[in-house]
Image (cartoon, rainbow, N blue to C red):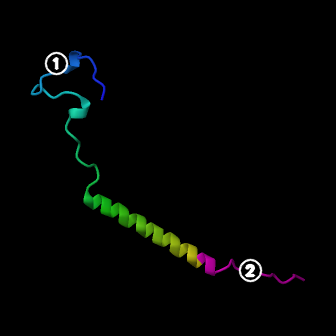
Amino acid sequence: MSRYPPDEFDDVPEDGPRQGAHRGLRPSARVGAGELTAIVVAGLLTLGVGAYAFLEGAGNPAPAPAVSSPGP
């Protein structure tokens, strides 16, 4: 591994105040377990409804147009 010459950033005390974005408190998860479960259930329900509609539509062809009798 390469050694670099020391600079002003090497003189930071180890027990000094913690600063910087990478050292901040990590925010808690925005989506909890309950919300995540609801999202997954809603997605599966939507997928199920779509699959049912697709399979029902594939089994029933479009109805034939009504034949009208010629008028007098």
The residue lying furthest to the left in this view is 15
| Picture quadrant where residue 18 is located | top left
Residue type at the position of mark 2: Ala
- Give above or below for 64 relative to 42: below
Question: Residue 31: x and y, percent?
Answer: 29, 53
Q: Nearer the viewer, residue 25 or 67?
A: 25
Residue at 45% over, 67% down: 46
Q: Check disc 2: other Cα within 10 Å, few if <14, some if 14-19, many if 20+.
A: few
Instruction: Tell me: 5 left or right of 15.
Output: right
Q: CA distance from mark 2 to mark 1?
A: 85 Å
Q: Which mark is residue 11?
A: 1
The image quarter in which residue 56 lies:
bottom right
Q: Residue at x 31, y 63 (%)?
A: 37
> Relative to 1, is 48 on the left or the right?
right
The answer to if 56 sits in the magenta stretch is no
Q: Residues within 10 Å of mark 1 (few under 14, many from 20)?
A: few
Magenta stretch, main secondary structure class: loop
Sequence-first disc among 2 and 1: 1
**Left or right of 31: which side holds 11?**
left
Tell me if 54 is positioned left or right of 6 in this view: right
Q: Quadrant of the C terminus?
A: bottom right
| Residue occupying image coordinates x 27% and y 23% | 3
Coordinates of residue 39 in the picture (x, y in percent): 36, 61
- Say which quadrant the N terminus sits in: top left
**Residue 20 x/y as whole percent:** 23, 28
The three-letter code of the residue at mark 1 reads: Asp
Q: Which residues are magenta?
A: 57-72
For the point 28% across and 20% down, which residue is it? 4
Secondary structure of residue under mark 2: loop
72 vs 36, nearest the viewer: 36
* Residue receiving disc 2: 64
